[in-house]
């Protein structure tokens, strides 16, 4: 198509040598994927590791990598459901940012022939973004978050002829045998402010009391509230609020949830009962749960 002649270049046999030449001559790595289809954006990461400034949509790696003052970004949110309309808006935004912000910054040169502000952007990028995408950082994460804890966990479970592992298995079998008898006694008692279907009040105290028949499992049974907040027409997860034990009467334990809501809005909530043992590594080690 004649209108694209001289403006689009297809590089054949792309390899490390061509990549080196390409990156050396770039000031802005412009990547504009369609939200939310960017798988990762490894070319942007490669550019980052070579001191280039990124200008991209907040999607893929740039959603996590972007830092103000160290590159530029288009918002992660769509303004239009129609992709054609969204593309036109993004195009206008890109040209506007280039014309009014990025290019003037690049050409704001001092008497020495360079832009101090532009150099500061590069320094910020190298200091605050690049270290998060090195192989060293990745390996430290694997060791700190997975390998070392797993090794310690395995050593703990194997000690004394697998004593801890046997204890956990015995506890799980006991919970599984009694789980069907664990149930809510009566109704959930809500504070007066929560007796409306959609509570909406800043600085409101979220307070609820639940009595649960633990079927002999006692404090192995835990309770928590799960709150959702309505945003942009959707109900999105807000937070979990653990309950505390306030009374015990045989197998029946009374739990109370207290939380000071600090942000206005419409909240939805429910409660869930689950078993817990301090010797488990994670709650997902035992997939038992009841919603009430």
Image (spheres, helix red, strand yellow):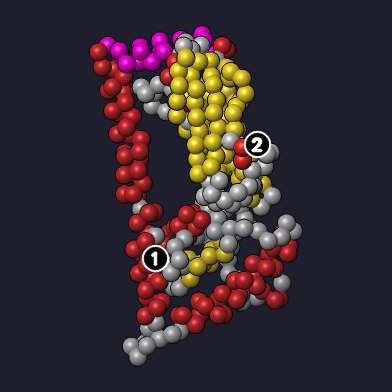
Q: Which residue sits at x=56%, y=46%? A: 204
What separation in Å lies between label 1 and label 2 (alpha carbons)? 51 Å
Disc 1 vs disc 2: Cβ atoms closer than 8 Å? no
Q: Which residue sits at x=49%, y=36%? A: 258
Q: Is residue 87 visible?
A: yes
User: What residue range appears in magenta?
Assistant: 161-179
Q: Could you say which disc has been placed on residue 166 in the image?
A: none
Q: Badge 2: few (under 14), some or many (20 or more) residues near its Cα, within 10 Å?
A: few
Residue 240 horizontal/vertical position (percent): 51, 37
Labels 1, 2: front one = 2
Q: Which residue sits at x=71%, y=76%? A: 2
Residue 288 horizontal/vertical position (percent): 53, 21
Q: Residue under circle 1?
A: 125
Q: Residue under circle 2?
A: 195
Q: Which residue sits at x=31%, y=19%? A: 157
Q: Quadrant of residue 79?
A: bottom right
Residue 4 horizontal/vertical position (percent): 66, 74
Q: Is residue 97 magenta?
A: no
As drawn, 292 above or below 231: above
Most distant residue in the left direction: 160
As drawn, 97 above or below 110: above
Prevailing secondary structure of the magenta residues: helix
Q: Is residue 175 visible?
A: no
Q: Secondary structure at mark 1?
A: helix
Q: How many marks?
A: 2
Q: Is residue 169 magenta?
A: yes
Q: Which label's residue is closer to the chain start, 1 or 2? A: 1
Residue 29 horizontal/vertical position (percent): 49, 67
């Amino acid at each position: 198509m004649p209108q694209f002649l001289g403006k689009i270049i297809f590089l054949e046999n792309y390899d490390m040598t061509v990549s080196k030449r390409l990156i050396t001559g770039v000031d802005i790595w412009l990547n504009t994927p369609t939200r939310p289809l960017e798988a990762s954006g490894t070319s942007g990461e490669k550019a980052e590791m070579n001191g280039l400034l990124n200008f991209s949509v907040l999607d893929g790696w740039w959603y996590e990598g972007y830092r103000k003052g160290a590159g530029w970004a288009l918002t992660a949110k769509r303004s239009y459901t129609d992709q054609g309309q969204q593309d036109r808006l993004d195009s206008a935004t890109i040209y506007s940012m280039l014309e009014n912000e990025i290019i003037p910054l690049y050409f704001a040169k001092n008497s020495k022939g360079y832009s101090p502000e532009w150099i500061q952007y590069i320094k910020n990028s190298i200091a605050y973004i690049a270290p998060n995408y090195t192989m060293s950082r990745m390996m430290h994460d694997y060791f700190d978050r997975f390998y070392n804890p797993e090794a310690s966990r395995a050593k703990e479970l194997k000690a004394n002829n697998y004593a801890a592992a046997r204890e956990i298995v015995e506890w799980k079998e006991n919970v599984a045998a009694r789980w069907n008898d664990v149930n809510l006694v009566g109704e959930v008692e809500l504070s007066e402010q929560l007796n409306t279907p959609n509570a909406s009040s800043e600085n409101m105290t979220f307070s609820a009391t639940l009595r649960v028949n633990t079927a002999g499992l006692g404090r192995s049974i835990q309770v928590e509230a799960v709150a959702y907040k309505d945003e942009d027409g959707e109900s999105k997860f807000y937070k979990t609020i653990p309950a505390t034990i306030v009374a015990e009467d045989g197998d029946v334990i009374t739990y109370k949830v207290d939380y000071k809501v600090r942000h206005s809005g419409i909240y939805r909530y429910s409660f869930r009962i689950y078993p817990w043992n301090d010797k488990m590594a994670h709650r997902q080690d035992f997939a038992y749960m009841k919603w009430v």
